[in-house]
Structure formats: C-alpha cells, structure tokens
Image (cartoon, grey):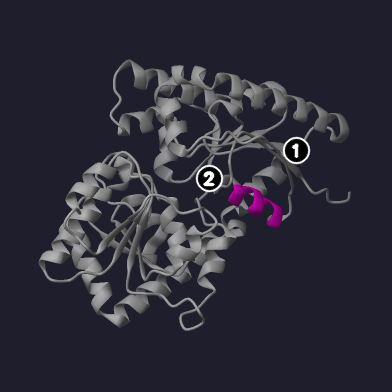
Amino acid sequence: MAFLTPTVLAFGTYNVRKHPRVGILISGLRKNGCTVEEINHPLELSTAQRVEILKKPWKVFGFGWDLLGLWRRLRQDAREWMKHNGKPDAVLVGYMGHFDVLLARHVFKDVPIILDHLIFAGDTAKDRGAQGLKVKLLKQLDRMAVGAANLVVLDTQEHQHMLAVLESNTASMVVPVGAPDEWYAARAVEPGAGSPKTKDVVFYGLYTPLQGVPVIAEAAAILAQRGHTPHFTLIGKGQDYDQVRTIAKDLANVEFKDWVEPEELPKVVASHAISLGIFSTTPKGLHVVPNKVYQSMAAGCAVITSDTVPQRRMLDDGVTYVRPGDAQALADAIERLTTDDDALSAAQQAAALAAQSFTDVEVTRELYSWVLKTNR
C-alpha cells in the first residue's frame, strides 16, 4: 500500500505573530512529513488580554460579537474545506485554545483533535492573585477544554502532571516550546560580521509574577552598589512594571522599552551577550520553561535563568542557573559573565549547542509519530 502523507488542519483564533508556539508546531510537522493547512482567523488580543478573559470569563461579552464572528467564519471555512477535501487526519488547536477546542469538537466530529495546552486557566489565574470560586470555575473550563481533545500537548512534565489534578484521562505528550527559525537566523550573523554582540544584558516579557522581573531590577541595583554597571535592556510591560521602575529609578544603566515589534525582536535580543529568563518563586514559575529561554539560546546569547526542576531537566547544561528569587545570586552570575570573557564564550557556546535540540523539526518528531499512528 502506498504511503499517504497525513493532513493536519491547524484551526482556531490563534495569532502566530503574537504567540509563535503554534507556528513552531505547524512548521515542525510540515518538515517531518505532514501536510498542514490552516483555517485561522486570528483574535487580535494580547496574551495579557486573553489571560484576563480566562480569569474573568464574563469579559468575553465585551468582545463577544467579534469572537462570534470569527467562530462563524471558522465554522464556515471548515465545512467548505471538508466539502472539497474530506475530513483531515487530525486537527491542531493552537495555544490559548480553551474555547476554540470546544468549537473544533463540534465541527470536526470523529476527527482526532490535538490541543496545545500550555496555559491552565485555573493555575494562571491563581498565579495572578485569584482565589476561591473563580479558580474553581476556571479549572472547570480547563476540564472542558482537555475533555474535548484526543491528545493534549504540554510543554513540561509538571504541566502534564496537572492533568491528573483535573482527573483527565485524555492522552498527553510533552513537546518543548522550542524556537522559530528566525531566532536561529538571528544568531547566524556572527560577531565581526556587521552585528557584533555587546556585553549588554537583555530581558523581554510581560512582567507577570512568574517572570520575577523585580529580581532582575534588584540584581542591577546590587551590581551598581559594587560599581559594576553593565547595560540592561528591559523590554515589555505588564503587572510588575511599576514595581520594577521604582526599584530601578536611580539606575542610569537600565533602559526600558515598552515594545519591540515581533519581527525585530530576534535581532535585538541576538545583539546582546546575555539574556535573562525567569526568576520568581511562584508555583507557576517553578514548573515552566519559558519561551524566552529557548529563543535566547537559539539567538546565541548566554542565558541565565532560575534553577528549577523543569528547566534543569529540559535545558541541562545549556544555561546558567541561579536560585529562584535570589537577586544576589543573579547579580553574581551577571558579574561573572560580563567580566570573564572565557566564561561568557563558554556559556554562549553551551546555549547554542543545547538549542539544536529545540528546533521546530526536533520538538515535533513525537507529535508527528502520533499523527501517523492515529491514522494507520
């Protein structure tokens, strides 16, 4: 019997430009041998806005008409697609697809559905201060989303274990977040070839509690007290932003950028010697491996991040670890790498080597095998 290339249909309101994870899955599945087509009508909301809706589902009514319009188009496009192509071999619902997966289950009856579930609504809301009934309701949303899928894709074993808390029997798989091709391309411009790295330090993110950005500001202040002032570029804005600005208000070597266009971000990060991961002690901060770590490694930066079980398991010797929440340890690590050229070079080489395991094609190999087995 001739080998048939499986067809995966990526479906939903995901926005690859703002949330590159689903783009990595799509690209990796294609490179591994799937035909991947998309029915995508992006919801123009930031991650913070999507999380806010997960925390306060009644806010859905504020943009409900737009969302319903997108779902109507998704359903129409899906039915038109199946009219001409038949049913796909699998449907992939992208990151933050708690609601999209419910629509997918309704539209694609008897088709295996893959849900990329990097964020648990209840866990995320709890990490940002919610409690009580709200958290219980959001956990129920997680149960509904997971229950609508045939396979749940998660990014760490810790998140995989959270399925047991939801009492879910849905099959699951750990797929590292990885990094898009453009981050590897940014590293391809070597020092001396027009874009030399500086000794500068960069962080980018949404200033959420799990990222621990105040720890970074405190480390910069400690270094300044020692008379050591490498340039820090802090990109982004969010919940902890005002606190960070207060801590760093007297530090002339800390530069704030509220926004960098996604297309420019890889080049901006790659121009720095050191990129910072996450440093909080929150429960959520202790069981994630953030996308910025994978991306910064791909870009050839030396990476410093918190010493947590999932990060050690996933990244091994590719990064420099410091104790979560420890500004003193972070300051020590930054000082060592910015004053010791050999240590900095070794850290950058370790990151670049480890990053080869997190290309789109590598992280999706097991997922591709699942699609094949499911359709035999």
Report helix, strand or loop for mark 2. Answer: loop
Q: Position of residue 135 (x, y in %)?
A: 35, 22
- The residues colored magenta run 23-31
Residue at position x 23%, y 73% in the image: 336
Residue at position x 41%, y 37% in the image: 161
Asked if 6 appears above or below 183 in the picture, the reply is: above
Residue topped by disc 2: 18
Callout 2: few (<14), some (14-19), or many (20+) C-alpha neighbours within 10 Å? some
Q: Position of residue 210 (x, y in %)?
A: 31, 43
Residue at position x 46%, y 38% in the image: 47
Task: Say which amino acid is labelled 2.
Answer: Lys
Residue topped by disc 1: 89
Give left or right: position of 2 versus 157: right
Residue 318 image-quadrant placement: bottom left
Q: Which mark is residue 276?
A: none
Asked if 205 appears above or below 152 in the picture, the reply is: below
- Contact (Cβ within 8 Å) of mark 2 with mark 1: no
Residue 30, can we see it?
Answer: yes
Task: Say which amino acid is labelled 1.
Answer: Asp
Give left or right: position of 375 versus 57: right
Majority secondary structure of the magenta segment?
helix
Residue at position x 61%, y 33% in the image: 13
Residue 238 image-quadrant placement: top left
